Image: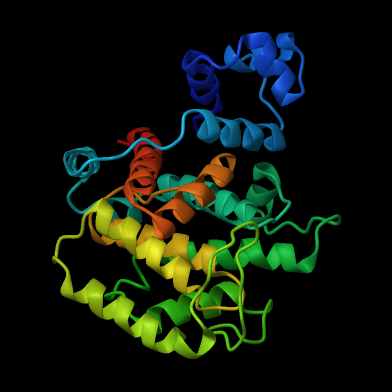
């Protein structure tokens, strides 16, 4: 899938505070290395990509997104809807396999699993055991793939979003990994690298009930903005002791399919940006996060086009 650090570098340079040599120095690389990144001849290390993203947000920042611009983002996403999207994916094994690999690799990598994409593919499709990887990492990948396969095939989880469904997702994702799989946390939680107050454990059942009721009350035909806002609120509640991000991103897939949208892949290469726009939505405004989700939906749609 397409990286976005090149456009970020170009926009940093066009904003004016750095020459190319100064930008290279700020990023701790040679001007020649930076030039290779910009022209697509070399790919930075993941830590460098995160540094580029952080600098981009410092220099370029988040511009205010108006109501009209939000409506335009929704229209962009609506242009990607395809009638009976879920059924089309369920009937196409090769498409399922590619989505399965992309989602599983990216979502588990965001949470720190160290398998690369090729290793993830071996574990999912060849049932391979990697001697230098832990049992937990194997389970994180195989559990995720199993749950996602059931979603893509439309054989499970096709009912309306409910607390029971969300707890079932968590139970199946975390089986063999956590003893409290499927149970709301009774302890304080934190999101690494983000200083934001999460829902108190005693308030989790009430907040989750409210989230589900609000989802059920809103318009029958959900928009990408509805899906993005649900994700923002779910991750702020953070109901489980671990696995909230993976459950949240699987819910995005499920909600997209229910609304005939492409099932969004959130890329590990954009992890830092994902966390930042998510936190921005939780603190200030959802516009940048909705734009992020639409961007990722458009990238996912490129996968679907290959099989039409």
Residue drawn at (72%, 10%) of the image: 31
Residue 59 shown left or right of residue 281 in the figure? right
Q: Specify the quadrant of the image occupied by residue 63.
A: top left
Percent position of residue 242, x then y: 61, 73
Give the camera-side residue of 194 and 161.
194
Give the camera-side residue of 154 and 71.
71
Q: Is 183 located above or below residue 221 in the figure?
A: below
Percent position of residue 197, x then y: 53, 70
Whether residue 67 is visible: yes
Residue drawn at (37%, 44%) of the image: 288
Residue drawn at (64%, 56%) of the image: 193
Q: Quadrant of the C terminus?
A: top left
Residue 81 shown left or right of residue 264 in the figure? left
Q: Specify the quadrant of the image occupied by residue 139.
A: bottom right
**Count of numbered marks:** 0
Q: Specify the quadrant of the image occupied by residue 269.
A: top right
Percent position of residue 119, x then y: 71, 47
Give the camera-side residue of 308 and 187.
187
Percent position of residue 237, x then y: 46, 74
Whether residue 183 is visible: no
Give the camera-side residue of 219 and 65.
65
Q: Is 14 located above or below residue 303 in the figure?
A: above
Residue 70 shown left or right of residue 163 in the figure? left
Looking at this rendering, what residue extends furthest in the front direction? 17
Q: Is 4 located above or below residue 251 in the figure?
A: above
Residue drawn at (30%, 59%) of the image: 227
């Amino acid at each position: 899938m397409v990286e976005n650090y090149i456009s970020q570098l170009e926009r940093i340079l066009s904003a004016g505070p750095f020459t190319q040599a100064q930008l290279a120095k700020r990023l701790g690389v040679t001007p020649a290395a930076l030039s290779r990144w910009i022209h697509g001849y070399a790919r930075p290390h993941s830590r460098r990509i995160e540094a580029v993203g952080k600098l981009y947000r410092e220099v370029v920042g988040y511009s205010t997104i108006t109501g009209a611009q939000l409506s335009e983002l929704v229209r962009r996403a609506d242009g990607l809807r395809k009638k009976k999207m879920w059924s089309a994916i369920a009937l196409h094994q090769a498409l399922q396999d590619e989505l399965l690999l992309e989602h599983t690799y990216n979502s588990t990598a965001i949470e720190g699993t160290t398998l690369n994409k090729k290793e993830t593919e071996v574990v999912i499709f060849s049932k391979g055991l990697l001697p230098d990887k832990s049992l937990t990492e194997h389970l994180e990948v195989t559990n995720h793939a199993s749950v996602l396969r059931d979603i893509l095939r439309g054989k499970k989880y096709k009912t309306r979003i409910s607390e029971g469904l969300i707890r079932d997702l968590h139970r199946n994702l975390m089986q063999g990994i956590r003893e409290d799989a499927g149970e709301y946390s009774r302890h304080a939680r934190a999101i690494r690298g983000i200083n934001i107050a999460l829902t108190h454990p005693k308030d989790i059942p009430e907040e989750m009930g409210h989230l589900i009721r609000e989802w059920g009350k809103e318009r029958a035909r959900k928009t990408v903005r509805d899906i993005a806002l649900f994700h923002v609120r779910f991750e702020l509640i953070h109901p489980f002791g671990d696995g909230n991000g993976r459950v949240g991103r699987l819910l995005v897939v499920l909600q997209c399919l229910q609304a005939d949208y492409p099932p969004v892949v959130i890329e590990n290469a954009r992890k830092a940006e994902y966390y930042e726009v998510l936190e921005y939505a939780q603190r200030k405004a959802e516009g940048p996060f909705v734009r992020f989700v639409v961007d990722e939906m458009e990238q996912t749609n490129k996968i679907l086009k290959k099989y039409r």
